[in-house]
């Protein structure tokens, strides 16, 4: 696979049949995403199991990501469209009654107590906006500043500093426990504010448990990014709510900041929201969307995410094929050397609490990247039990493709999210040179390496090694 940047595709009514799922994998999907905001626990688990069955029939590693809804404020409209007209005064109350053009009910207790005069409320990812002008104990009055059509259960963005709800919610925990038992590979946590939020979920750490992905979509998350990265396995730049929470003109700079921080920390990062949104209905993306996707690649993102485009769009497979084509072109123009130099400059000196093992791991990963660059190798081979070595090398964004050999299917699925990593199932038997050459022969026999090719390979000295402590540069055996 020439493409380095990965594709996350959201599954919905347009894409949840086995036939379409298989076609999406063939088109280039690396990770399937399932939301929990509009489905029951049973429905989400059933979809997870269906996708697992489809993936098992494919000859490639594909991850499954479940996105927890978090403390999302939603209004309750009926199935038919309701127009909010600019200049109209509306009342905002707590409750599950069906909303109208002048009475809006939201799913938060004491909603009026979470608002102050002057707050700007955005509905449906900014499709309509309201400004609060009076607040009493049980109702807030607002004026529609920008009109729009509402239906179903659109989100209502309220400044995160106003909300007393924390993430994950009790409902999130119920979903998490269910999908954890189902064996999902990744779980995203919405509306994270601090690193403590990420510690609230139970279960074992990855790879025995799922990768935990922090969605950066509040000002508090931006302010506490370092702490969140410390307690997360990956992050998502959730540009929908982030663009409403923070300054919209400042969103591109925030995207760059978050991506750079995540990659420097060795954590995969997903760029999400409205990547190819016009393709929900159209056969081609806009030029602005193509440029947006390419710029996310140039920023260093590990993956880009498709939402409604594949969940409810008219042709999910075409969307993924189009995204893959854009990414291949963008990857070809990525400035590898400049990025690698920046990451090496950002590398922190060892602290007092660093162990000898962590120092060895850091040295091996850095050396492998440098060796591949000096040799102009097309591949770097990693033998990994947890995926940590492959992810750490990935942060340098090398020109070489990282072939990650692991005996663990879940590790392979989790590595499907990492930039430039091609995970493959395999074992490394024996000791020393025998162990290394066995891996290279297996990759040659799979057609992933060419006979005579010179490659760096990082591995442990044996299966019992606690860290990758061997770097060899070898020619792939001819026979």
Image (tube, rainbow, N blue to C red):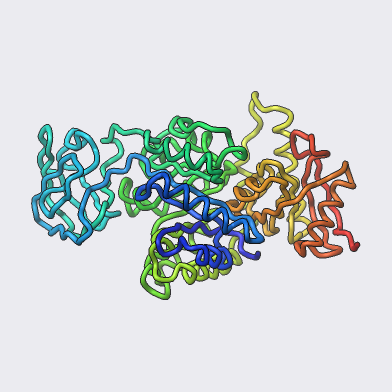
Image quadrant for the N terminus? Answer: bottom right
Q: Position of residue 6 (x, y in %)?
A: 56, 58
Front residue of 226/5: it is 5
Query: From this viewpoint, is residue 417 visible?
Result: yes
- From the top left corner, tell me how far across and down residue 8 is, in percent: 50, 57
User: In the rendered view, would you say 448 is above or below 173?
Assistant: below
* Residue at x-position 54% and y-position 70%: 325
User: Can you give x and y, in whole percent of width and height, for residue 83 in the image?
Assistant: 16, 60
Q: Quadrant of residue 400?
A: bottom right
Say how many tags the image has. 0
**In-image side of 400 versus 450 (left or right):** left
Image position of 353 (left or right of 143): right
Say which of 297 and 212 sits in front.
Answer: 212
Vertical placement of residue 354 versus 450, above or below: above
At a point 81% along the width and 46% down the height, the residue shown is 428
Left or right of 407 in this view: 197: left
């Amino acid at each position: 696979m020439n493409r380095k940047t990965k594709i996350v595709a959201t599954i919905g009514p347009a894409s949840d049949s086995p036939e379409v799922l298989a076609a999406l994998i063939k088109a280039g999907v690396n990770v399937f995403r399932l939301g929990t905001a509009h489905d029951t626990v049973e429905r989400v688990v059933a979809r997870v199991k269906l996708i697992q069955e489809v993936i098992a029939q494919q000859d490639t590693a594909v991850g499954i990501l479940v996105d927890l809804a978090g403390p999302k404020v939603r209004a309750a409209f009926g199935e038919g469209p309701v127009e909010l007209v600019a200049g109209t005064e509306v009342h905002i109350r707590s409750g599950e009654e069906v909303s109208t053009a002048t009475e809006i009910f939201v799913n938060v207790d004491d909603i009026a107590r979470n608002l102050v005069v002057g707050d700007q409320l955005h509905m449906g990812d900014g499709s309509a906006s309201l400004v609060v002008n009076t607040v009493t104990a049980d109702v807030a009055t607002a004026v529609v500043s920008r009109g729009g059509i509402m239906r179903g259960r659109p989100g209502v963005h309220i400044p995160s500093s106003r909300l007393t709800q924390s993430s994950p919610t009790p409902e999130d925990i119920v979903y998490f426990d269910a999908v954890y038992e189902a064996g999902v590979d990744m779980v995203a946590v919405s509306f994270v504010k601090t690193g403590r939020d990420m510690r609230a979920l139970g279960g074992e750490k990855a790879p025995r448990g799922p990768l935990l992905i922090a969605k950066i979509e509040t000002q508090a998350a931006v302010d506490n990014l370092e702490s969140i990265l410390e307690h997360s396995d990956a992050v998502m730049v959730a540009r929908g709510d982030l663009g409403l929470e923070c300054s919209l003109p400042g969103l591109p700079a925030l995207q760059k900041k978050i991506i750079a921080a995540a990659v420097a920390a060795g954590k995969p990062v997903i760029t999400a929201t409205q990547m190819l949104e016009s393709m929900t209905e159209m056969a081609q993306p806009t030029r602005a969307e193509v440029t947006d996707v390419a710029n996310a690649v140039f920023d260093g993102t590990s993956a880009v995410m498709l939402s409604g485009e594949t969940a409810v769009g008219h042709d999910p497979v075409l969307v993924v094929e189009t995204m893959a084509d854009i990414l291949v072109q963008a990857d070809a123009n990525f400035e590898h050397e400049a990025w690698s130099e920046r990451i090496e400059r950002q590398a922190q000196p060892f602290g007092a609490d660093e162990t000898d093992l962590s120092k060895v791991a850091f040295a091996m990963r850095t050396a492998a990247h440098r060796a591949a660059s000096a040799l102009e190798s097309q591949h770097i081979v990693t033998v990994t039990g947890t995926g940590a070595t492959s992810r750490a090398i990935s942060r340098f964004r090398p020109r070489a493709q990282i072939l990650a050999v692991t005996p663990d299917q879940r590790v392979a699925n989790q590595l499907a999210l990492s930039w430039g990593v091609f995970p493959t199932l395999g074992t490394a038997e024996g000791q020393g040179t025998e162990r290394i050459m066995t891996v290279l022969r297996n990759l040659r026999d799979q057609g992933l390496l060419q006979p005579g090719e010179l490659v760096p390979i990082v591995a442990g000295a044996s299966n019992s090694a606690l860290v990758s402590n061997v770097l060899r540069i070898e020619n792939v055996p001819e026979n």
